[in-house]
Amino acid sequence: MNKYFIIAFTLFFLNAAHSQSNIDYNLLDSIKCELGNADNIKEAKVIHEKFKNGSTKILCLLVKYKTDSIDRYWLVGPAIRYFKNGQVKGKSNTDFRTNVVRDTTKLFFKDGAQKAFYIYPKEYSDSILCGPLFKLNKMNYYYFVPISYIHSFYYRNEKGSFSEGAYKIVLKPNRTKKKHGIWKKYDYKKGILSVKEYDMGTLIFEKVEKQTND
């Protein structure tokens, strides 16, 4: 099979798999078989870790490249993690051609509500080597991360308060983490408590709601 067809085929199905709420093992296994025919792939394997109750814990795809003198495993394509209750814990996608994490990595609470997003740019000047994105049983693997990205988070506690915000993360030349974009604080009974907007760490807007005593 033509190696360029294999690459195009693989990229199509990796993107298709990432768009699904659940990544199917059989789909990843078929992608693994196609990758095995690529000239630069030494090994491709599907990782399917399970909880003791038999439910899926982690499902992802790893490869080794013939050109990698260190003989490392690399994370490629979509990966998904679950809680024991079957809810999705996290989803990520790593570019097959560059091994750079792409699109948006999503994390969730056990009830399915969103917890955090890591939003990666389509265009970037550089990337850094990282690993692992999540723990696998007795296995190390690697991937790259763009030098800058947005970390958007959602926080809540048992008392009913809720907050959301985002950081701009820059990894080179020195790691910086600055508040960026809209930050909000909520109370389930009182509603919005405050709204703030930041531009790379500088507060440019603030609105605090007046609260009345019950």
Image (tube, rainbow, N blue to C red):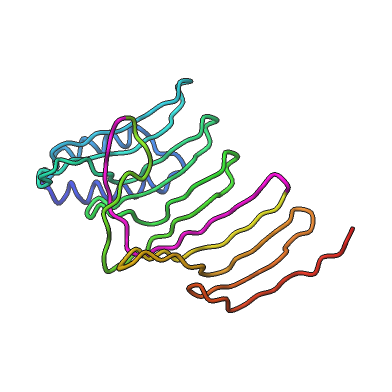
**What is the residue that sits farthest to the front in this orientation?**
174
**Percent from the top left, x then y, of residue 204?**
58, 79
**Percent from the top left, x then y, of residue 24?**
38, 35
In the depicted structure, whether residue 137 falls above or below residue 159 = above
Observer-nearest residue: 67 or 175?
175
Q: Residue at x 40, y 63 (%)?
A: 149
Q: Report the span colored magenta.
A: 138-159
Q: Is residue 49 magenta?
A: no
In the depicted structure, whether residue 189 falls above or below residue 209 = above
Q: Residue at x 56, y 49 (%)?
A: 114
**Percent from the top left, x then y, of residue 1?**
11, 42
Q: Residue at x 31, y 50 (%)?
A: 94
Dividing the picture into quadrants, the one containing residue 210 is bottom right
Dividing the picture into quadrants, the one containing residue 139 is top left
**Percent from the top left, x then y, of residue 38?**
13, 43
Dividing the picture into quadrants, the one containing residue 75 is top left
